[in-house]
C-alpha cells in the first residue's frame, strides 16, 4: 500500500472551535457530560502519553492528553513534573504564535499527577510517519516554521525546557534508569548507541559519545548564537495542515535556542518522506528564515541532530528487517556523520 499524501494546503482559514469556559479548579468531572469517550490506542507518539477522544453533547469532538511523568517518557527525560505543555498554554505563549502557525489546545487544568490538555480533534489533518511531503507542501511548512523563529528572535519566552535537557534527551546516562520501564524507548535508544559506537568512524563517534556524557560544550555553543522559540520536536507527526495554517502539536520540549535546532531535527527525523534533498531543505530554511538564520548555529544544530538521533539511524542501518531501508538509512547515517565531522573540524565547540 502506498503512503497517503497529505492534503494540499488550501488558502482559506478554518473556523476555530470555541474554548471551554475558563473556570478556576476545573477537573475531569467537567467532561462528564461527554456522550462518547474512547482511548486512542496505537497513536504515533512514542513518549507514552495517554490520549482520549471525547464527543460532547453538542457534537464537538475533542482529544484529551494527560500529562503525567509516570506515563510520558519525554516528561521524565526532560525533568518535567508538572506538564510543560500545559504551562506554555496557560502562560499565553501559544497565543503569541505568528500568523500561519497555530496550536490545537483549547483548555487545560492541573491534575494531582500533572495536567490535562483539551485539544481540538484534528482528525486526518494530522500527518503520520508515512505521509510524504511534496516540494510545495515542504515550502508551506518551512515558511511558517521560519515565521515562528522570526517572531521570537532574540526574545524567547520564559518558562521553557532547558536547552541541555533538549540537546541531551537521549543521553545514555539519562536513559539507563528507565531501561526496564514498560515504554521500550529507553531500551531501544541504549541499544542504538551501542551500535553507533561500534559502526561509526571513531573520529566522529568518540566526540558524539563524549557530548552524550557531557553536552556542556554543545549547549554553550548553541546558547551563544541568536536564540528564539523553537518547538523542539518538529516532525510530520506533530503537524496538521488546516487551511492556510500549520498547526503544531506536542509542545512538550519548547526551548530557547537557534531556530536551526528545529530544522536539523526535522531533517534528521523526516527527510526520508520529503521530496526535497537535505541540502535543499537547509537552503529553503535559510531563505525563509532571513534574519533568523545563522550559519554557525546551523553547523552546530547538524551536530546536535546526530547527538539526538544517531542511535536510531545506526540501529536502522544495522538491523532494520528491510534491506532497502537498511541501505537508505546507512546513506543517511553517512551524511550525518560527514556533516558532524565538518562541524567538529570547524572548531565551533
Image (spheres, helix red, strand yellow):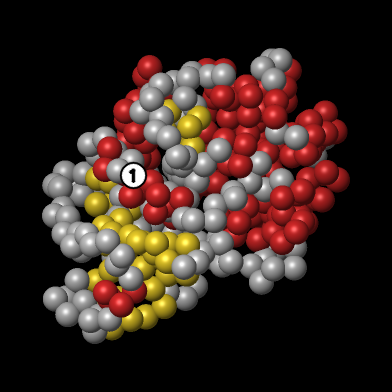
317 vs 57: above or below: above
Within the image, what quadrant is residue 150 found in? top left
Residue 262, how many percent across, how many down?
48, 36
Residue 159, how many percent across, how many down?
45, 39
Residue 17, how many percent across, how many down?
17, 60
Residue 330, how many percent across, how many down?
70, 45
202 vs 20: above or below: above
Residue at x 41% of width, y 21% of height = 154
Q: Which residue reaches farthest front? A: 24
According to the picture, the residue beneath numbered tag 1 turns out to be 91
Q: Which residue reaches farthest bottom? A: 35
Badge 1: how crowded within 10 Å, few (<14), some, or many (20+)?
A: few
Residue 49 in view, yes or no: no
Q: Quadrant of the C terminus?
A: top right
Left or right placement of residue 193 versus residue 34 in this view: right
Left or right placement of residue 333 versus residue 112 in this view: right
Q: Secondary structure at mark 1?
A: loop
User: Residue 293 versus residue 226: which sits nearer the camera?
Assistant: 226
Residue at x 56% of width, y 62% of height = 69
Within the image, what quadrant is residue 166 found in? top right
261 vs 347: above or below: below
Residue 77 in view, yes or no: yes
Left or right placement of residue 314 versus residue 292 in this view: right
Left or right placement of residue 62 versus residue 176 in this view: left
Residue at x 65% of width, y 61% of height = 185
13 vs 278: above or below: below
User: Residue 40 versus residue 131: which sits nearer the camera?
Assistant: 40
Residue at x 43% of width, y 35% of height = 158
Amino acid at each position: 500500500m502506498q503512503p497517503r499524501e497529505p492534503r494540499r494546503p488550501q488558502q482559506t482559514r478554518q473556523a476555530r472551535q470555541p474554548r471551554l469556559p475558563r473556570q478556576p479548579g476545573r477537573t475531569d468531572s467537567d467532561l462528564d457530560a461527554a456522550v462518547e469517550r474512547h482511548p486512542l490506542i496505537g497513536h504515533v507518539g512514542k513518549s507514552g502519553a495517554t490520549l482520549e477522544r471525547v464527543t460532547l453533547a453538542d457534537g464537538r469532538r475533542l482529544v484529551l492528553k494527560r500529562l503525567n511523568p509516570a506515563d510520558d517518557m519525554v516528561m521524565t527525560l526532560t525533568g518535567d513534573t508538572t506538564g510543560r505543555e500545559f504551562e506554555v498554554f496557560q502562560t499565553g505563549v501559544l497565543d503569541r504564535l505568528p500568523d500561519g502557525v497555530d496550536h490545537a489546545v483549547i483548555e487545560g487544568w492541573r491534575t494531582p499527577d500533572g495536567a490535562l490538555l483539551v485539544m481540538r480533534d484534528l482528525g486526518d489533518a494530522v500527518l503520520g510517519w508515512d505521509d510524504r511531503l511534496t516540494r510545495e507542501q515542504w515550502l508551506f511548512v518551512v515558511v511558517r516554521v521560519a515565521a515562528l523563529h522570526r517572531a521570537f528572535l532574540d526574545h524567547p519566552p520564559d518558562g521553557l525546557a532547558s536547552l541541555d535537557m533538549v540537546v541531551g534527551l537521549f543521553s545514555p546516562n539519562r536513559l539507563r534508569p528507565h531501561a526496564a520501564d514498560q515504554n521500550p524507548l529507553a531500551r531501544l535508544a541504549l541499544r542504538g548507541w551501542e551500535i553507533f559506537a561500534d559502526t561509526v568512524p571513531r573520529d566522529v563517534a568518540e566526540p558524539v559519545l563524549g557530548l552524550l556524557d557531557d553536552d556542556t560544550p554543545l549547549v554553550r555553543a548553541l546558547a551563544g548564537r541568536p536564540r528564539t522559540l523553537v518547538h523542539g520536536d518538529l516532525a510530520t507527526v506533530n503537524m496538521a495542515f488546516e487551511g492556510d495554517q500549520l498547526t503544531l502539536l506536542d509542545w512538550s520540549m519548547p526551548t530557547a535556542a537557534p531556530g536551526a535546532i528545529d530544522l536539523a531535527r526535522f531533517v534528521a527525523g523526516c527527510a526520508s518522506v520529503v521530496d526535497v534533498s537535505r541540502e535543499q531543505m537547509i537552503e529553503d530554511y535559510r531563505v525563509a528564515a532571513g534574519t533568523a538564520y545563522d550559519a554557525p548555529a546551523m553547523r552546530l544544530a547538524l551536530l546536535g541532530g546526530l547527538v539526538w538521533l544517531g542511535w536510531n539511524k545506526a540501529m536502522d542501518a544495522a538491523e532494520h528487517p528491510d534491506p532497502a531501508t537498511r541501505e537508505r538509512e546507512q546513506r543517511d547515517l553517512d551524511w550525518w556523520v560527514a556533516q558532524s565531522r565538518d562541524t567538529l573540524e570547524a572548531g565551533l565547540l
